[in-house]
Amino acid sequence: MSLNIARCAIGVANAYPHKCVVLVSDEVLLRDRIVQLDGESYANLCAIPSAAARQWSRTSQEPPLVQKAHQGIKETTRFTPPPISQTSISNPENQDITQKSHSKKSNFGQIAISLVKYGITTIFLVTILLVGWRSIYPKKFQQFWEKIGLPPLPELFIEPK
């Protein structure tokens, strides 16, 4: 399993030579194998433990191995120009952090909007249910209404038969 994971990480690093590829694993042997590959033209690939990844997410400060991978990318791009599609992207590290903070803010906004929508829908459905009940069974509804202790409702425009 870890051999397949290492192969996948190497494949992603090969596919995106100008991007930093970080493998997060608590398996020491897997991380050691990735570190051994550092000299074999995988300067953009690194492996860190999950504790370092959590610390990175909390502090937004890259672990030393990730900084080393970024440095390796900078050194390789000095000698080989990046593909045309990469030149239009300015500082992808900051874009990732910015996108994460925007996604958190937008998630809270989307949750709030969803709660408001569901609240309005629930109030509407309960109102329709109560109006229908009052129209069809006015005596039972009135008994229920008085039992709850709510103030009396105005008379209906059309009295049911």
Image: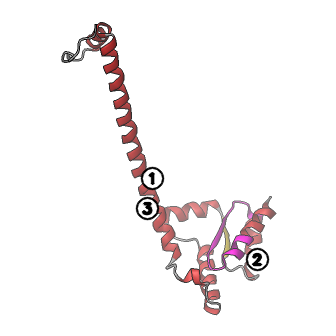
Residue at x 58% of width, y 71% of height: 63
* Figure label count: 3
Amino acid type, callout 1: Asn
Q: Which mark is residue 102?
A: 3
Which segment is the magenta one?
A: 10-29
Frontmost of labels 1 and 2 is: 1
The N terminus, quarter of image: bottom right
Q: Nearer the viewer, residue 10 or 53?
A: 10
Q: Is residue 133 left or right of residue 106?
A: left
- For disc 2, the neighbor class at 10 Å (few under 14, some 14 to 19, many from 20) is some
The image quadrant of residue 16 is bottom right
> 23 or 55: which is nearer to us?
23
Q: CA distance from mark 3 to mark 2?
A: 35 Å
Q: Residues within 10 Å of mark 3 (few under 14, many from 20)?
A: few
Query: In the rendered structure, which amino acid carries the disc numbered 2?
Result: Leu
In percent of the image, x 69 and y 60: which residue is there? Answer: 26
In terms of depth relative to the viewer, which is nearer, 138 or 116?
A: 138
> Gap in Å between the C-alphas at discs 1 and 2?
38 Å
Residue that mark 1 sits on: 107
Q: Quadrant of residue 118?
A: top left
